[in-house]
Image (cartoon, rainbow, N blue to C red):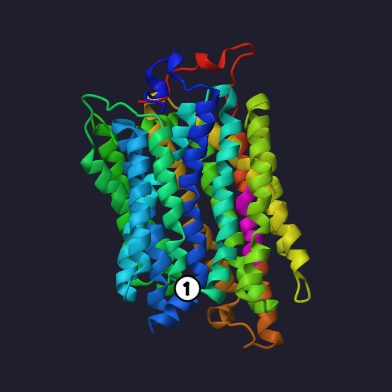
Amino acid sequence: MVSKGPGAGTSDRPPAAAKWAILGAVMLGSIMGPLDGSIVNTVLPSITRHFHTEIAIAQWVPTIYLLTISCLILLYGRLGDMIGYRTVFLSGLAAFTVTSVLCGISQSIWMLIAFRALQGLAAGMMMSVGYAIVTSAFPPGERGKAMGIYAISIAVGLGLGPTIGGLIAQNLSWRYVFFVNVPVGLAAVSWGYRIIPRGGRKPGQRLDIRGAAMAFVFLTSLLLFANRGEGWGWSAPASLALVALAVASGAAFIWTEKRAAQPMLNLSLFADRVFAFANLSALLNFVATYAVVFLTPFYLSIVLGYDVLRIGLVMAASPVATLFVAPVSGAISDRIGSRPLAFCGMCLQAAGLLLLARLEKDSGAGDVAWRLVLAGAGAGLFGSPNNSAVMGSVPPAHLGIASGILAAMRNVGMVLGIAVAGAVLYSCAPVAHSMEPGTFGEAQIDEFLCGLRWAYITGAGIALAAALTSLAAGRTRRPAAGTRPDAAPPAHP
């Protein structure tokens, strides 16, 4: 077992075999978050029928999970900087495994919602420090390659989720979507405990409780507004109250962090142009990506009439493309920098979205799949270099909070992507609110397709905005030729 964190000194970086084992251990644990997030939506109708509940109530099963993942993710990143990334990651992994069992044995819809909230808190711990552990283990000259390979775990989780969910929905009880996490979780905890380096607890560190509370209120109110605003009405009193709360808590958070002796989020990090714009690019990328994730199943179901399993198989085209492109993109970024790859990746994703907007009533699975491949390849081309740029732009002592910010960008982008795509779709095609496969005629299908096209076009515009912010990020500093990889600065607290 590697007993010392690689940040203890330049000679304490793990040897080649150990660093790849560390990456594998983090990937095995990290696959479960996106897998669980994508798999549950597939079996939501089965859960609704089993508990004889309303769709509006059952919708809280995925919603509460996404909200609780995001609300404490910055706090977890800061804790990783204070007490060690290994402790936070493995604690979250163990708790995720336990709460998966609790979700699977739930006896009521409200019990399931409560356990899903706890499961989201555990998933947030895993997601918040994964980038920090990987960054700590690899020298700067290999960081892009490592980030690209790490992206495979997220792509595989997102890609397998709909397919596994479809198989379970057709052949087993919905409870197995949670039980499937248990053997993976046990294996990941066991391997991670042996492989991931111990991080030393930093003396004299205090947690910024007030800042953590303000961040919690800000993220919760913002994401709840984005997630539920369309259903409540964007100008409804509850929606406006959430906006006001988000603005007030966000301003209070910034005020608190500027004056705290040991802030939870060191705002000076955003003075670095690469860090600020690369994080903004990550946010916009996930908004565009989740426009695809949210809209395309509706097209496959309502227009083409596909069943759950076939939808899952077609939707897998995008993450599979990401899986193949991300490692190559990350490795190339170690040589040429992140900006050209990130820019080209978002342009490619925008092209995929514009082509999805050209789908017709008589398009087939292949027509959808190759467009999804373009969008997924663009996301893969962008993601690894951009993540490497973010993590390479911060001092070693702040790797945890930087990792937490990246994870927050991902989750906030996911929620905003669904909210923006839904708002455009429903404003252009009000009939989409109540559409189900096989229940509407030609006129309603045409209206739905019109709304779908404008939603895809909006997503393409957001992807192009991400391309521009990628250019604005400027050049990342690359290791000088001949620099020894193990001469990198300490990167583990």
- Which picture quadrant has residue 401? top left
Residue drawn at point x = 66 percent, y = 39 percent:
343
Q: Residues within 10 Å of mark 1 (few under 14, many from 20)?
A: some
Q: Is residue 114 above or below residue 78?
A: below
- Can residue 461 be found in the magenta stretch? yes
Q: In the drawing, does residue 481 fall left or right of residue 98?
A: right
Q: Bounds of the magenta span?
A: 454-464
Q: Nearer the viewer, residue 265 or 58?
A: 58
- Amino acid of disc 1: Leu
- Which picture quadrant has residue 132? top left
Q: In the drawing, does residue 483 fall left or right of residue 181?
A: right
Q: Nearer the viewer, residue 209 or 119?
A: 119
Q: Is residue 98 above or below residue 110?
A: above
- Can residue 288 be found in the magenta stretch? no
Q: Secondary structure at mark 1?
A: helix
Residue 442 percent location from the top left of the image: 71, 86
Residue drawn at point x = 27 percent, y = 28 percent:
201
